[in-house]
Image (cartoon, grey):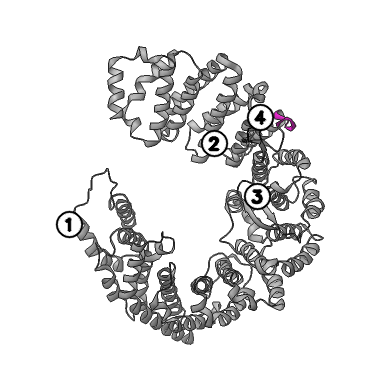
Amino acid sequence: MSQCYAVCFKSHIMKYWVPDEDEEDVLSEADRAAVKKSLVDLILVSPPMVKAQLIQSMGIISHADFPRKWPELLPLLSTKLSADVASSVTILDAINSMFFFYRSAFASDALWEEIKHVHETFFPTLKTSFQTYHVALQQAVAAKDVAAIKLAAEAMQLTIDIFVSLNAQDIAAYTEDSMADWFPTMLAELAIPTDVLPHADEDVPSQMDKLHTAIVHAAALFAGKYEEAFAPFVQQYLQAIWVLLTSKSVQTRFDDLTAECTAYLEALARRAWYKELFTPEVLTAIVNSVLVPFVATREADEERFVSDPQGYVSVELEGDTASRRGHVVKLISALLGNFEEPLTAMLKTHIAQLSQGDWRCKEQAVRLVMAVAVKSQTKAEGATSLNSHIDLGSFFGEQVLAQLRTNPETDPILKATCLRFISLFRGQLPASFLPQAVDIMVGYLGSQEYVVHTFAATALEQLLALTNDVTNADGTITKTPRVPPSVLDLKVVFTRLFGVLASHPDSRENVAVMSAILRVLLVVGDAVLPLANDVITQIIGRLVESAQSQTSAKYIHLLFEVVATLIKSLCKAGGAGAVTQFEQLLFPLYQQMLASEFSSDVQPYIFQTLALLLEHRSDISAPYVALFPSLLNASLWDVPANCAAIVRLFVAYLAAGYGAQLAPAHLTAMLGVYQ
């Protein structure tokens, strides 16, 4: 029960501590003062689950009020730090929640003044505590006291996290003057074996893993941003981090640690300051021990492909930059800047060998090519600049295309990665091959694997989105699709796309598939007219489903974009008959959706699409007349997203001649809304 109260308290703080400009401040100054006075002591005596909520609450309040409105907070927390490691961990956790936002905050004079104030008032205390916890950890390790090791390691980790936050924006003079007090001590902690803490969970890092991760993260930050100050420690940390990096197994518990170790190498590789460190021997060791093995698909990746396909897709499509594999890709990119030719030659040897192996080896080879061949890329075009030392065409034909032409249901992870290859290099594919690439993607929409048919839909949408710039006689530029719409067998394409939504429970709200449907409609325009009834029926079915349950916001947005695109294309080509058909189908459904508990999610889209329909009319039909009074409901206008949509609908009413039929009461209500 106390945890529920703590969650409610945090929610209340989030909602009311900083009221919006147009909202009344419901918290009195007396209430605010009482919360601030008791919160720290309450955190110290609360059980862990409650404590976590209260610490987050304190972070919210301090972000708003510290230091100007809560100057006593940091001195109070400082007095609570002591040689008692157990109680200090709680205070350090609270302090960490205060300062963590410094890492991503927008740089400003006010922010730097605040950080400077923290350095002046707290940094000496932090440094003293750091040395205290270091001694406590060394003593606990010597005594083989597991409980004490865990506590001291957590205190050290939190202290280092705070240290990083305070130096994330810029290095302070206090830090520069005390580098020798911090980094040699952290280096000593890296030498503590992780197995001093028994740990059986292969997926979750131990507390010693977390400490090592925090230390390496600090080293990577300073090596990348403050190379002159960190220069005396570079070589020692490189040796220690290399030992960590090459001694850890492929267990997922080490993913964060190995990712940070790789980030350290990347930080060095991107700086000309450290170029001499990367001798041919060092490059060879990095290729053999890090780059090649770390891009391989592990058993855990195979399990996630099957048990959490949505998560697998999300990581692949939205960027894998924080993972072990993602950091390897960034390291390759960094090394290409100074060592393109030797690095590429080494990797090509491995790629050739792996291409002759089983599906895991082949998939590893494809990922290596995707990493080493790209020098720059954009979201619209994929890869835009290539490594000239890679024969991408030969690899594509002999490996990627060869794999995609085999049975779509075999080796699904390899097939999925090959589809991602097509997406990445879509802008580099010969124009003559693009229709064939589209056919391949349409074929893979039939795959039973969620990841495979989702990647196929993504690639299809991206291929159809490719355009060429054509300069007209008047100097203007027209964008034309690189894939001619005439090559699309629309019946097959729509059958496959809607088949994914209908046949696979996990794909009933597949955003990639709906994006592909939208892209096809945008490309073919009114050429969809012969299949209009089938497409409209399918889309209405999707709308009916969304009206009956909570639906993802992105899917809803795309679904209504499809409706709007169909209205524009078909009403222009089909005239008044098409408008009437849409109205007959949509009005009853829209009434149902507006009456549902999820109506706030769809109201703007409904009003926008109704405006589109009405803009194709020259008169007002009965359903619009019946709808008009409800549009004057003040509650609709309280939702900002509704305002522009309803205004557009009002304009459509007036353009269709409804102004003459407005009752005085309606006009008064409209003016009242605009006030």
Report the mark closest to the observer, 3 or 1.
Answer: 3
Q: Which badge, 1 or 4, is on the more N-terminal residue? A: 1
State which region is magenta: 485-490
The answer to whether residue 455 is left or right of residue 35 is right
Report the mark closest to the observer, 1 or 4.
Answer: 4
Q: Amino acid at mark 3?
A: Gly
Q: Is residue 488 magenta?
A: yes
Q: How many marks?
A: 4
Residue 563: image x %, image y %? Answer: 55, 28
Per the image, the residue denoted by label 2 is: 558
Give the residue displayed 59% in from the left and 37% down from the top. Answer: 514
The answer to whether residue 545 is left or right of residue 115 is right
**Considering the numbered disc 4 on the image, is that residue within a helix, a strand or a loop?**
helix
Per the image, the residue denoted by label 4 is: 524
Q: Amino acid at mark 4?
A: Val
Q: Are marks 2 and 3 in contact (CB under 8 Å)?
A: no
Per the image, the residue denoted by label 3 is: 382
Quarter holding the N terminus is bottom left
Asked if 174 appears above or below 101 in the picture, the reply is below
Q: CA distance from mark 1 to mark 4?
A: 64 Å
Q: Which badge, 1 or 2, is on the more N-terminal residue? A: 1
Using the image as rendered, state which of residue 514 and residue 382 is in the foreground: 382
Q: CA distance from mark 3 to mark 1?
A: 57 Å
Per the image, the residue denoted by label 1 is: 30
Asked if 400 appears above or below 625 in the picture, the reply is below
Q: Which badge, 2 or 3, is on the more N-terminal residue? A: 3
> Would residue 596 be visible to someone looking at this image?
no
Quarter holding the C terminus is top left
Using the image as rendered, state which of residue 134 and residue 117 is in the foreground: 117
